[in-house]
């Protein structure tokens, strides 16, 4: 059977729907096995005599080969067979485990990651680069050249393995049946439904209060009970969306190994808190930022083995990915035990780029935060790893776009820690609602420090920005009424919401304070993706739409036009 068998062709008694479901399961399971193989191969490089580790890698390759053959993907099965034969030679000790073999096997994992989706999509042959890699595998394991077809017994065994019914895997299968893969689209629909229920409840509650008065006490009590059940449902839905960070963190085991070796360094990855769970949307959004941070640690943090040895350190550096829950947030550290930030070079770079007039007047914390400025880089040479001036600024903007924050702590000769603080979910945020010219806006509660009344002396100003005193310090402020070009006359009494941003604090002047508000986030339509300062929308209790403000973006955008904010 060729790899180009159409998905709607009945096979082995399966109709088109069953086969499609089976192929989806095969793709997911293969991806998991390849990830496990990849991690184990990197570990095997540091423990070449670990027989059990090598045995586990061999079993994964053997299972993948059989599963592919059972589904008619002969090219994938043949490639996996070549991998299996090389692993067999390593098991029998006819060749020794070394970095060269590990590299070839890791390249084979990458190839199979591409081959499986290709085969499922109907590709007839493997790519030329994959064919060349298979020839390299065969030359390293010559007895693989006589590879033949699967026997009836082995095919039957592999068929059972696909469906998870083999007797030897009964324990593993029992564990799998306790979990269920759910499409994100279905979860999003559930969450949207919960949001609609919340809207309907808010409107009902408002009507009960305004029309029934005291006679509606019993109805209000029933409403409170319904509200409690709704909250339980909402929390359950959010729990279903939560996934552990371990699989995401483990993807960087290979990254650390490959990148460090490519630049003449030795480094390993340590993972802590892999069981910590976070909303699946956060996990997807974190990938790029973590990649920047890990690569930055290897480029600027970890020293060469010779330098580390002279400093009395282990020649192999360590990059640690750590996750913990703190209240309603998740805190992720990317820590390295390298040389630490070079404050002298940071100051020189900041001066040469005109970022600050007198870098030596900055505190140590302010110097370290300069690495988050746009285009900032201390790399002396341009490489594929560093020197392009786009890493940490991208991280900061990306994290702030997730309603989070990023900070840095560094000690000379000991290392650097970058810390991300993020909400557990992007589906619901704790917000603070304000009113401006009859419209309602929601600020992420985590960015709000406190509120105060705008001094009368400032109400006569016609500028969009100004400066007031706040706890003995000057506080720059921005009028949202002017930012959004709102019509009408401002009220006699205006309020200042004090918010935090990466450079400190600022005030947002609003007409009305509505207070805390739990917002079910509704994404903006495609037509509104380029609207500045807005990160989403939510439905209020009265059915109206409120926009969720992107506070860091709003303040960054107005800095050039409002010098007071940049002070």
Image (cartoon, rainbow, N blue to C red):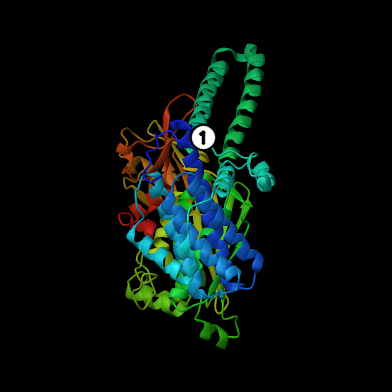
Residue 550 at what x, y percent from top left? Answer: 42, 46
Instruction: Determine whether 60 is above or below 24 in the image.
Output: below
Residue 414 at what x, y percent from top left? Answer: 58, 76
The residue wearing badge 1 is 187
Q: Quadrant of the C terminus?
A: bottom left
Q: Nearer the viewer, residue 512 or 264?
A: 264
Q: Residues within 10 Å of mark 1 (few under 14, many from 20)?
A: some
Q: Name the residue at 56% across, 21% down.
A: 205
Q: Name the residue at 51% across, 32% down.
A: 191
Q: Quadrant of the N terminus?
A: top left
Residue 493 at what x, y percent from top left? Answer: 44, 37
* Residue 378 in sight here: yes
Examine the image and state in which quarter residue 394 appears. Answer: bottom left
Q: Name the residue at 31% across, 45% down.
A: 462
Residue 129 at what x, y percent from top left? Answer: 35, 62
Instruction: Determine whether 114 is above or below 451 in the image.
Output: below
**In the rendered view, does 426 fall on the left or right side of 222?**
left
């Amino acid at each position: 059977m060729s790899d180009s068998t159409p998905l709607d062709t009945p096979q082995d008694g399966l109709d088109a729907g069953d086969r499609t479901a089976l192929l989806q399961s095969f793709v997911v399971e293969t991806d998991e096995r390849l990830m496990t193989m990849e991690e184990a191969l990197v570990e095997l490089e540091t423990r070449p005599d670990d027989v059990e580790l090598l045995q586990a890698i061999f079993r994964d390759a053997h299972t993948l080969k059989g599963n592919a053959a059972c589904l008619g993907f002969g090219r994938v099965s043949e490639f996996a067979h070549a991998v299996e034969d090389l692993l067999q030679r390593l098991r029998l000790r006819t060749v020794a485990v070394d970095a060269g073999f590990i590299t070839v096997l890791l390249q084979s994992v990458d190839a199979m990651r591409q081959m499986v989706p290709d085969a499922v999509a109907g590709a007839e042959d493997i790519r030329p680069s994959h064919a060349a890699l298979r020839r390299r595998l065969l030359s390293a394991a010559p007895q693989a050249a006589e590879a033949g077809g699967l026997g009836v017994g082995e095919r039957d065994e592999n068929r059972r393995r696909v469906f998870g019914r083999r007797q030897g895997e009964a324990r593993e299968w029992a564990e799998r049946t306790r979990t269920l893969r759910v499409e994100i689209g279905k979860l999003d629909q559930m969450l949207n439904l919960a949001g609609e229920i919340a809207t309907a409840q808010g409107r009902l509650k408002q009507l009960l209060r305004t029309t029934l008065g005291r006679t509606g006490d019993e109805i209000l009590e029933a409403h409170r009970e319904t509200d409690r059940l709704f909250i339980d449902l909402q929390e359950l839905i959010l729990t279903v969306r939560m996934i552990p960070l371990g699989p995401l963190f483990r993807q960087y085991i290979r990254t650390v190994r490959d990148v460090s070796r490519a630049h003449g360094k030795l480094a390993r990855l340590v993972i802590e808190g892999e069981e910590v769970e976070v909303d699946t949307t956060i996990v997807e959004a974190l990938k790029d930022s973590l990649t920047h941070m890990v690569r930055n640690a290897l480029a600027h943090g970890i020293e060469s083995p010779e330098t580390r040895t002279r400093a009395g350190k282990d020649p192999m550096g360590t990059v640690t990915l750590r996750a913990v829950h703190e209240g309603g947030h998740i805190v992720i550290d990317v820590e390295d035990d390298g040389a630490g930030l070079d404050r002298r070079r940071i100051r020189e770079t900041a001066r040469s780029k005109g970022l600050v007039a007198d870098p030596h007047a900055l505190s140590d914390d302010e110097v370290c935060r300069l690495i988050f400025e746009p285009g900032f880089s201390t790399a002396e040479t341009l490489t594929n790893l560093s020197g392009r001036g786009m890493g940490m600024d991208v991280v900061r903007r990306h994290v702030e776009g997730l309603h989070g924050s990023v900070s840095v702590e560094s000690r000379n000769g000991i290392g650097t820690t970058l810390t991300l603080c993020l909400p557990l979910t992007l589906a619901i945020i704790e917000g603070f609602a304000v009113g401006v010219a009859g419209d309602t806006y929601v600020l992420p509660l985590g960015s709000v420090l406190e509120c105060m009344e705008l001094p009368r002396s400032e109400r006569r100003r016609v500028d969009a920005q100004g400066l007031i005193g706040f706890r003995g310090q000057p506080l720059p402020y921005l009028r949202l009424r002017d930012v959004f070009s709102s019509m009408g006359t401002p009220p006699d009494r205006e309020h200042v919401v004090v918010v935090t941003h990466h450079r400190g604090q600022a005030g947002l002047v609003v007409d009305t304070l509505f207070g805390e508000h739990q917002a079910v986030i509704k994404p903006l339509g495609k037509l509104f993706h380029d609207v500045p300062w807005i990160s989403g929308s939510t439905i209020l209790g009265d059915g109206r739409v409120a926009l969720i403000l992107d506070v860091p973006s709003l303040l960054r955008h107005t800095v050039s036009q409002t010098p007071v904010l940049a002070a």
